[in-house]
Image (tube, grey):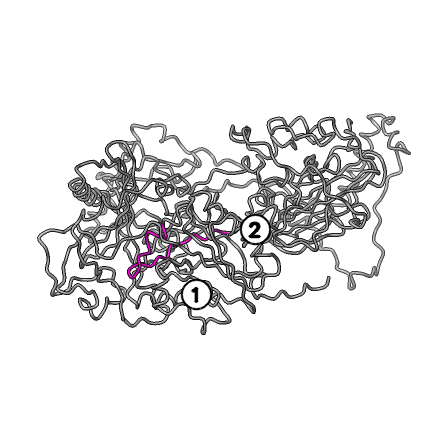
Amino acid sequence: MRCLDLGRPPASTAGLAPIPPISHLSPLLPWQNDGQDLDGWFSRGQRSSQATTQPKLNLTKQALPWNEQYKGKANLHVFEDWCGGAVRHLRKNLHFPLFPHTRTTVKKLAVSPKWKNYGLRIFGYIHPFKDGDFQFSVASDDNSEFWLSSDDSPSNSRLAAFVGKLGTEWTAPGEFTKFSSQVSKPLRLMSSRRYYFELLHKQDDRGSDHVEVGWRVFLPSLKFEVIDSSYISLYTDESSLKMNHVEHIPQTLASHSGSYLWEAQQDEHGADMLKSDPRDTFFLTPAIEASRVENVLVPCAYSPTYVVKDFPIARYQGLQFVYLSFVYPNDFTRLTHMETENKCFYRESPLYLEKFGFYKYMKMDEEEEDPRQRAFLFLNPDSESLLPTPCPPTPAQPLTDAAPGAPGSSSRAGLRGAACSEQSRMLRLHPSRLAPPQSAEKVYVTRLQPGKRKAPAQEPAFPSIFLYPKPLKKVHLDGPRVTSFLKMSETTASQREEGKGQEEEEEEEEEVSDYSYETGELQQGWLEDSINWQRTFSVSSVDFELLRSDWNDLRCNVSGNLQLSESEVVDVVAQYMEKLNEKNGGIYTLLRIVNVEKRRDTARGNRYLLELELAERGQRTVRLSEYVYVLLHQGKQDDSAEANPDGPAPGATEPQPSPWSILYGKPILCRPLRLSWKQDVMVHFVVPVKNQARWVQQFISDMARLYGATKDTNFNVILVDFDSDDMDVEKALQDARLPRYQYLRRTGNFERSAGLQAGVDTVEDGHSIVFLCDLHIHFPPNILDSIRKHCVEGKLAYAPIVMRLSCGSSPREPNGYWEVNGFGLFGIYKSDFDRVGGMNTEEFRDRWGGEDWELLDRVLQSGLEVERLRLRNFYHYYHSKRGMWNARIKKPPKD
């Protein structure tokens, strides 16, 4: 067997030369098993052209200084709260590989935390105990990969052995030879060198979690032994480093986030929301000049009847008075890919759908019965069930069983006679059916012979004690004596036949067969259901969106935004474009309707947010984003509180018009007073944190990317830190590329309400927006534009619905549900926030959960509307509360 000498680095790696391009990686893998090369193991089919054109990776080539004190341990990084059993699932983790949940060490390459839904990355150096050829093997539950370098450089690591790649493969502890991929080819190592290694392991929520690496000198008779502390060492000492200090973490092909391995493992997801939409980047289009849209429409008072002002609301019942807006065109926020199990979008109950399905929407076509096409199942041509039924006697042979004049006898006889005449006609057409029945087919069945039944064996009084000796089986000593198995061939065929016959006779004398063969009749089979493959049905087009209302449905978490009819949108846009060109001399042409949002009020009028892409004089493309109002009813009083003093009825979705309302001849398109949004208003993101280094760093990085994508300088990041000791939050803010930030340090236990209130108190400008935020959020690039559009001082607050990702899901593979009950992500003007009283810091001092509903109650009672929309690509990352905030960790039990 060919061996590769790892004692001398290959020519391509000598002197730490740059790693070749990705397209030339396969020639560097001559010592891997078949099927273990990077191309075949990570990719599905051929690599995409996108993967081959990626830039050169910034891998860790120069190893860090090594110390003799590092011997006896290896570095261990833990990534918790992540589902799936394949290593590719670990690579999809948001924090892999730089920001693990825990950084610690292990003293041997055999780890079993007895936990679930986690991933491990163990790395360091292996020190061979002699020069020679070694084989490595990895065993794990679930999948794992063992990478080994040709020297001490992490950049030269190559895949040596692995367990599975789908997440369904596993081994028992110490089972080193279950899969061919577990065992590496023999590798030449030298005792004077150290070799960088990396072990990746992924565990789901089932099985006995373990991962171990064994090695042996390349001799077939030797067994694999776990590599213990005598032959491993740390890559570096991390004990004194903060969790956001990541410059020392090695980057390899196994764990580099920029590697084409990541692109090759990305599955095409079925979520419609991942498709591009002009809404996502419309904020980049230059806005139309404000003077062009001034006085385009006549002004009108904006006082919707559904606003709750000074109306008593029971505790936590404000969310019952929040209504949804309609959207055009379809933004594909409906989670159609999650409706395999959750069908709450449809009005039928889950139990009904489970039993009856959707057949009530289908009308089956009437079937034309044709006797010649009737389906029969002939189980036995000799069965009596298929023979013609004897007909009643003819008139020449009158019935003797039926009494003359018996009631119903003539009718029954007539029906039976008609049936038999039809049968006789068919039999005349098919004379073969009149053939006499053949004798029943004989089959053999096994039955006990009562005369030869053996007596049951006598049970001993004490099963473990022999009260009498057992009879010994007789052994024939006649015939040729065979002294060796190899001498058996020397006996003649006749001698073997003679001995065989004697043995059979002896067995017949000792034992009598309990069974014999008797003849029996073949059992009649049962009938099977016939299937009509030609059945057709009729169906009408059903728009299930029309069955939905703008009530905030708290039961269904997969339905998307309400859909607005196209005809209504076209009518409103056409009227507005006519007015716009009347004022500006016809210089605008409608290119595209990007987004229209409608808040319905059938009692007074509907509010619309029009977002149109226009061509100005046929050259410049501009963006129009304005609120308009289609006034249906005009009350005598402009103040909504006076027009509706008692407030809306609880649960009412369409308030009825007031008796003193005056109906215009036709709806009027007008400009709602005091309902215009500011495109450059400052937005403050307020986030309280404590000891969540990986999430804090992720949030800061997301904010920096948001600034890079939008170049918007009018937002501020306010982090309220409750004595975090796992990272320097202030320094992380200083190092990030943010337009502005504020760092506020507080002592004591974590308090979300107090932290949010402290952050808002640092904002001095009351005419700016504060966005109460969570730490585990992925923001779309249009988040700033979305917050500004839906926050109007004195009128509107904004509570976008976030999609909560499931365990193991990411923004690129978004499985989860809409958080329809949560109002923790809340945008409101600072002046309105102060007017409603801010956060309830007294009641929610030592706990959190419910403070968002309590704030919502007071916001609605102050007369503000709360805009509620599902926002595309707006995600809440999956995480558990283990180790968060003030949670205490109990000590693990001793084994």
Left or right position of 484 against 247: right
* Mark 2 surroundings within 10 Å by alpha-carbon count, few (fewer than 14), some (14 through 19), many (20 or more): many
Residue linked to disc 2: 82
Residue 718 appears in the picture as rendered? yes
Residue nearer the viewer, 819 or 378: 819
Residue 400 appears in the picture as rendered? no
Dot 1 or dot 2: first in sequence order is 2
Write the residue at 62% across / 36% down. 58
| Position in image of residue 459 (x %, y %) | 75, 59
Residue nearer the viewer, 282 or 491: 282
User: Is residue 445 found inside the magenta-colored segment of the image?
Assistant: no
Residue 165 versus residue 4 in the image, above or below: below
Give the residues drawn in magenta, as a range. Answer: 786-806
Residue 438 versus residue 209 in the image, above or below: above
Left or right position of 783 against 618: right
Write the residue at 14% across / 59% down. 634
| Residue extending furthest toward the bottom | 842
Assign a secondary structure to mark 2: loop
Occupied quadrant, residue 394? top left
Q: Amino acid at mark 2?
A: Trp
Residue linked to disc 1: 761
| Position in image of residue 364 (x %, y %) | 27, 42
- Front of the two marks 1 and 2: 1
Write the residue at 59% across / 57% down. 728
Locate the C terminus and report the quarter of the image it occupies. bottom right
Locate the N terminus and report the quarter of the image it occupies. top right
Write the residue at 16% across / 62% down. 657
Left or right position of 336 against 86: left
| Position in image of residue 534 (x %, y %) | 32, 35
Q: Amino acid at mark 1?
A: Asp
Assign a secondary structure to mark 1: helix
